[in-house]
Each structure stands twice: as C-alpha cells, then as structure tokens.
Image (tube, rainbow, N blue to C red):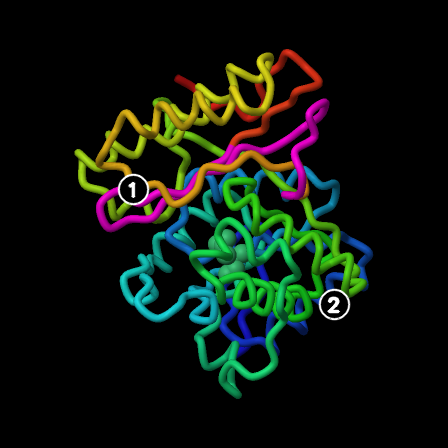
C-alpha cells in the first residue's frame, strides 16, 4: 500500500515508484525537494544535515537510508555496518523530516550492479587508493537517488570531504540539475568527528581515535608557518601514538588538487584504530589567520 504523506512526520517509503510519485508531485508545487542521503545509524551529524536542509526556504526534506552494497569492497564492513531503521525513523520524526526513503538492495538494484558511474582522477587518490571501487559505488547510488527523489538540492557532510568533491564533479560533468551543499563536520566535545563507524570502537580505541582530530588541530595551528609546517605538526602527533596505523595524511587544495599556498586548503587523514578505519579532515587557510573547521579541544 502506498504510504500517506504526512509532512514533518518522517513518512517511510520503501518503493522507488512511491517516493518518485510523491516527489514529482512536490516539485510541481515549486517547493525545493531537499535530499539528505545517508546509510542510517543516524547520529547528531546526520541530524545537523537535516537541519541544514530545513533552513532552505520552503524545503520538503527527504532522508534516504540505504546501506549501499556497491560502495563496499570484499572484506569491508558491509555485513557489520549498523542497521537501526526503527530508531533512525524516530530520530527523523523528532527532527521534523518530511519523508524517509528506505529501499531494499533488490529495490535499488533489481538488475544487480550493471551500469555504474566512474569518478575521474580525484576518485583515485586518498580514499580511492585504498578503496579503488568505493567512489564508483557512491556515485552510482547518489545519481540514482537524485533521479528517484527528483531532488532540487542535496546535503552532504564535509566529514566525507572527498565524497563531496566527487559528487560535485559528477553534478557538473553530467549536467545534473541538483544543487549540492556541503555541511560542516559535527564533533564530540573532545574533538572526535561523529561517524556511524565510531560504534565499532572500544573505550580504549575511542581514546586513541582522538589522535586524528588532535593531529588536524596541531596542523591547523601551524597555518601561519606554511604547508610543510602544517603537515609536519600533524604528522608528529600521529607518530607519537604507535597504535595508530596511518593510511594517509595529506594537505590538498579545496578541490583536492595542488595546495594553494595563499588560500583555502584541506588537511585530510585516514587511519586504522584497531580494526576500524576512520577518516577526518580540517580546513586550512594560508590566506587568513583563522583556523577553519577547527576541532574543539
Ligand atoms: O556518506 C554516506 O553515508 C554514503 O556514502 C552515501 C552518500 C549515503 C551514499 O551511499
């Protein structure tokens, strides 16, 4: 049965046809349809994306919850990834989201993974080196979600900074009529960036994980001394904790190309803490004294 849409009540849709029908009708009312794509296991970071969506005047906010098998490689945590749909819908209802799209893998990929969208060069660096098929999986599902939900806008967290860039590139390169908006990272009081994967961490590992945001903060405080000093300061913090298995620590320009020695850049880190792989990043502006996106100490 087609669900009855109740604005602000996080009405749940499981079928592509039902959510597409609803959102097509909504677009005809000229209201912005704002998509917040997620894989569920919602935390305050996701809710901040919903709030960002709600700030768009007249927005109808659709949150998708789908653990996308296509973006997980063999041996990654697809099966272990937390699935908490009921609790997620409760949180979205409390936040006043309008609709939830929660399809099954069969609903999303009735023909299996057949046609896939490949990222350009940016998809091959940083995360792409360790996870070579990841961004093709992300772009494929995001492109489908854009079409299925007829969205005019979509909100993505800057926590997955490289993801945001490859999605922006897809929108430009494929002439998609969707406005992509990045929203700031949400952190715990001690600096840990919120992530659904934090639930994998033991208490000891959680303490160790703070090394990542501490390294980024140390790097950011050296912005006045130039790029090499930034990377060296961050590296020193990581090296002081031997339990952290560093994957990469890199400074890049805002589009993840060359560093702009006089402008805004991004310092990005990925590391394994025990069995859990975590990522984080911070804005570093060589053109101003200000530390952007600073983790709170
Ligand atoms: O960032 C995520 O949670 C996922 O990569 C996304 C964008 C929902 C696509 O599955």
Task: Please give the residue where the numbered disc 1 appears in the rendered image.
Answer: 245
At mark 1, the secondary structure is strand
Name the residue at the bottom extreme. 111
Residue at mark 1 to residue at mark 2: CA–CA distance? 50 Å
Q: Horizontally, is 21 left or right of 245 in the view? A: right
Quadrant where the image shows the C terminus: top left
Tell me where residue 196 appears, x and y as whole percent: 37, 48
Task: Please tell me whether residue 148 is drawn above or below residue 285 in the rendered image.
Answer: below
Q: Which of these two is toward me, 261 or 77? A: 261
Q: Residues within 10 Å of mark 1 (few under 14, many from 20)?
A: some
The answer to whether residue 213 of the structure is visible from this angle is yes
Q: Which of these two is toward me, 79 or 17? A: 79
Tell me where residue 45 appears, x and y as whole percent: 47, 39
The answer to whether residue 279 of the structure is visible from this angle is no
Tell me where residue 203 appears, x and y as whole percent: 18, 35
Marks 1, 2: nearer the viewer: 1
- Please report whichever mark, 1 or 2, sits nearer to the chain's N-terminal start: 2
Where are the magenta residues, as a range?
Answer: 256-281
Q: Which of these two is toward me, 286 or 116? A: 286
Res 273 quadrant in image: top left
Task: Please give the residue where the numbered disc 2 appears in the rendered image.
Answer: 25
* Residue drawn where x is 58% and y is 29% of the image: 283
Q: Residues within 10 Å of mark 2 (few under 14, many from 20)?
A: few
* Residue drawn where x is 25% and y is 29% of the image: 241
* Residue drawn where x is 33% and y is 60% of the image: 83
* Residue drawn where x is 48% and y is 56% of the image: 129
């Amino acid at each position: 049965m087609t669900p009855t849409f109740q604005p602000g009540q996080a009405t749940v849709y499981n079928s592509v046809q039902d959510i597409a029908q609803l959102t097509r009708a909504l677009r005809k009312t000229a209201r912005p349809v704002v998509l917040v794509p997620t894989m569920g296991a919602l935390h305050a970071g996701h809710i901040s994306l919903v709030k960002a969506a709600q700030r768009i005047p007249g927005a109808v906010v659709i949150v998708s919850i789908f653990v996308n098998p296509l973006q997980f490689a063999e041996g990654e945590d697809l099966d272990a990834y937390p699935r908490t749909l009921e609790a997620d819908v409760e949180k979205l209802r409390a936040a006043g989201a309008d609709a939830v799209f929660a399809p099954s893998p069969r609903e999303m990929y009735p023909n299996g993974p057949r046609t896939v969208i490949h990222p350009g060069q940016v998809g091959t660096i940083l995360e792409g080196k360790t996870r070579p098929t990841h961004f093709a999986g992300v772009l494929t599902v995001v492109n489908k979600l854009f079409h299925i939900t007829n969205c005019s806008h979509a909100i993505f967290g800057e926590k997955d900074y490289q993801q945001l860039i490859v999605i922006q590139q897809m929108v430009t390169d494929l002439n998609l009529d969707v406005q992509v908006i990045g929203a700031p990272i949400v952190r715990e009081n001690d600096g840990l960036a919120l992530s659904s994967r934090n639930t994998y961490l033991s208490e000891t590992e959680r303490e160790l994980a703070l090394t990542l945001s501490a390294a980024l903060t140390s790097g950011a405080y050296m912005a006045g001394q130039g790029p090499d000093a930034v990377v060296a300061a961050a590296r020193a913090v990581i090296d002081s904790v031997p339990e952290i298995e560093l994957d990469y620590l890199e400074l890049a320009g805002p589009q993840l190309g060359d560093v702009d020695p006089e402008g805004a850049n991004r310092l990005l880190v990925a590391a394994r803490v025990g069995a859990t792989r975590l990522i984080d990043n911070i804005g570093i502006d060589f053109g101003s004294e200000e530390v952007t996106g600073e983790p709170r100490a």
